[in-house]
Image (cartoon, rainbow, N blue to C red):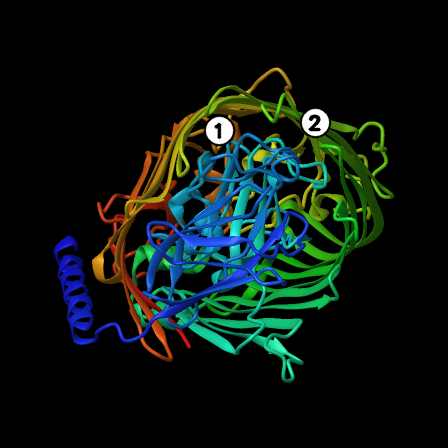
Amino acid sequence: MIDHHTRHIHIVILLLFSISYTFAQQAKGTLTGYVTDMLGYPLEGATVVIQGTSQGTVTNQNGKYSLENLQPGSYQVTASFLGYKSETIYNVVVKSVGTVPLNFSLMTQEETLEAVIVQKQPTSRPKETPLSYQQLSAVEIATYPGGNNDVVRVAQSFPGVSPSVGGFRNDLIIRGGAPNETVYYLDGVEIPNINHFSTQGSSGGPVGMLNVSFIEDVNLATSSFGAVYDNPLSGVLQFNQRDGNRKNFRGNFRLSASDAALTVEGPLFKGRNEESNTSFMLSVRRSYLQFLFKFIGLPIRPDYWDYQYKLTHKIGDYDEINILGLGSIDDFSLESPEDFDEEQQATFEQTPFIEQQTNTIGISWKHRFKNSKGYIRTVLSNNTLENNFTRYEDNETQSNPFFINDSKEAETKLRFSYNKFFDGWKLEGGFNTQLSNYKNSTVDLKNDAAYITEIDFFKYGYYANVTKSFLEGRIDLSAGFRMDDDSFTSENNLLNTFSPRMAVSYEFMPSWKLNATVGRYFKLPPYTILGFRNNDSELINKNVNYTRSDHYVIGIEKILSGSSSIAVEAFYKKYADYPVSVRDSVSLANKGGGFEVLGNEPVKSVGKGRSYGAELMFQQKLTKNFYGIFSYTYFFSEFTGFDESQYLPSVWDSRHLISFTGGYQLPKLWEVSTRYRFSGKTPFVPIDIQSSTASYPDLIYDYNRLGEEKLKSFSQLDIRIDKKWNFKKISLDLFFEVQNVLAEDLPQPPEYGLARDESGQPLTPRTLTEITTDSGTIIPVIGLVLDF
């Protein structure tokens, strides 16, 4: 198999070299953007310089700059203005067509607390989150090996994030926490579902929905979350979108390993003006995996569409309105394999049918105060998830369903934040309200459960935070709190969800910082838990508590240069009131990482948990053609069931996590990048063979044996080669990628299917047999990005 794929690799590499010598670079590019202060006010006369060259310019009265006649390539660009701290952005890609505008937000020298620390750090961090915070630019995401243009999959390579079981899902498992412990925000709008075929009650899925062409940067906080965010227990993942082109109509076409996407953008109502105050971006993406899987004989048919849009309108100098949307149409179906194969037959028999539709729409209004000392932001959004999840006794005829989940979740949210800056202080406060509606019709024959439910309730919360710097900016202090309550659960109120948090950062020596954070966080259990009814139609989970997580983190950081840093952190997470399954006597922290409906069962809020360890990270932004990030995390993850004194290793307790991603830029717009991930041996829940034989194709897990057996370690190396061409009207990036270069077997629990004779007929009496699987496949991928 390796020799077969090696031949394909050699052919593609030769093809790339052939194309590169056939076409010469024929056009140059232009880099434009705006330089503003932290609140968005334009800075006239700011200097923008490309490092290592004599090319530079100054901004006009609107804060706009333009650097023309640039040779396509990657640059470091610095913006500076008298009385403000300079800012350098690394790995800025200039193309003949499709160069993304580069904007700067500079901070005054005196007002050192406003929003972020820029002092010689490769990554700017909110002062409320001086620890456990990572950022990737759009360029880094687009060229990520193994990322497949999937923003969520790229985030799995952040420090402290475990790969999913088998490595094929987009679950964010952060420092030993469960997949549903992270919240997601897109331009300040909460996005509950960011994956196709997502697990209801959790958040993961096999393919992300976000289009990388929209993204400006991605930020992940794994501790010390800002008080503005409700419901995070392990992480907050923020996606910041860029604005559409306000001058010209542009577009791009992306072809990846699983789908094709078309994106268009441009100005609206421009008239004869050079630029419009209104811009838009719109994309549509379509999968072709269903055709590929049919061609190679796999029984699964993952068919999906998604769409994304953003409309930006500036009203004068102080107001801006953004309208954004994201949605998907998913159909996960099955077809019987033409030729008998025991592995494919078991997959066909055990896999559910899934039909999902999601939609999120949000409108935000940002108003800046005329005295340049603050702003307010109001966000109104609505999101829905329709999930039809069915499992059949006979997938061939789609007959005798034994599990049906037909549900709809809908939320309407209003968020308001007030931000004020004065005399070196930053004050922030606000509130959020939410109207929730959940409908569900469930038939669960294996557990003798059937019910129809509908619940409506109101959720609300308040927060405040204050930040101040002392000793000429050497000490940063941030303290805040939030409180949440709802009109549905019976055991919660604003006082018992009071969640304080504090962060301190101390520069005790030049380029050395000691950081520490402490915080308490709460999460409302998912709707699948809240709306569950027993056979007497009673809402027996109504008395559940908000799940609590207390974080304690301390770390030391050394800024090696303007582009590199090294940091060591120690962390401890303590959980309380975690939902525990009454049926399985296991914490729901051990579920949610597969194709299932999480929480659709009776639970009790009695579980405890803890996750603790240490993390080392080195980061190098693009310098001398090299960039990279390396991290090592050593941790323990343990949860209890009904016995609060007995902590058992969770199914995420791999103990060791190693991640490295790096790249090197070669002459003539060639680039080579690589990603390596390692995860230690992870516990899994064995199958109860006797019970599963009777209930097949429904497999029954023996949670009493959790921790007895472990998967082998996960190890995967991916390599990617990019080559770019630039012409007058188009630019092209052609990439070739080899995933799992070392042909490592990916860790998976043992798979079982019915024992069969040579013709494929089940044996009598019916018995289960373990299936031999081969997951150590080298996967070659070719794709392209065409800007026009």
Q: Determine whether the residue tagged by mark 2 lies in a helix, strand or loop.
A: strand
Q: What amino acid is at disc 1?
A: Leu
First-in-chain label (1 vs 2) = 2
Query: Residue 691, how many percent across, how many down?
Result: 50, 40
Binning the other alpha carbons within 10 Å of mark 1 as few (below 14), some (14 to 19) or many (20 upward) gives some
* Quadrant in the picture for residue 560: top left
* Front one among 448 and 646: 646
Query: Residue 200, how many percent across, how many down?
Result: 62, 52
* Front one among 47 and 576: 47
What is the distance, in whole Å, between disc 1 and disc 2 at their CAs? 34 Å
Q: Determine whether the residue tagged by mark 1 lies in a helix, strand or loop.
A: loop
Residue 12 in view (yes/no): yes
- Tell me if label 1 and label 2 are in contact, CB under 8 Å: no
Query: Residue 31, how many percent across, how many down?
Result: 44, 64
Binning the other alpha carbons within 10 Å of mark 2 as few (below 14), some (14 to 19) or many (20 upward) gives many
User: Is 462 placed left or right of 70 in the picture?
Assistant: right
Residue at 60% of width from left, 46% of height from top?
A: 202
Count of all numbered marks drawn on residues in the image: 2
Residue 206 in view (yes/no): no
Disc 1 versus disc 2: nearer the observer: 2
* Front one among 571 and 218: 218
Q: Looking at the rendered structure, which numbered label has been put on residue 706?
A: 1
Location of the C terminus by quadrant is bottom left
In this view, the residue farthest toward the bottom is 272
Q: Looking at the rendered structure, which numbered label has been put on residue 468?
A: none
Residue 259 vs 107, above or below: the answer is below
Q: What amino acid is at disc 2?
A: Arg
Query: Residue 265, how many percent across, how many down?
Result: 55, 74
* Quadrant in the picture for residue 108: top right
Q: Looking at the rendered structure, which numbered label has been put on residue 501?
A: 2
Residue 558 vs 100, above or below: the answer is above
Location of the N terminus by quadrant is bottom left
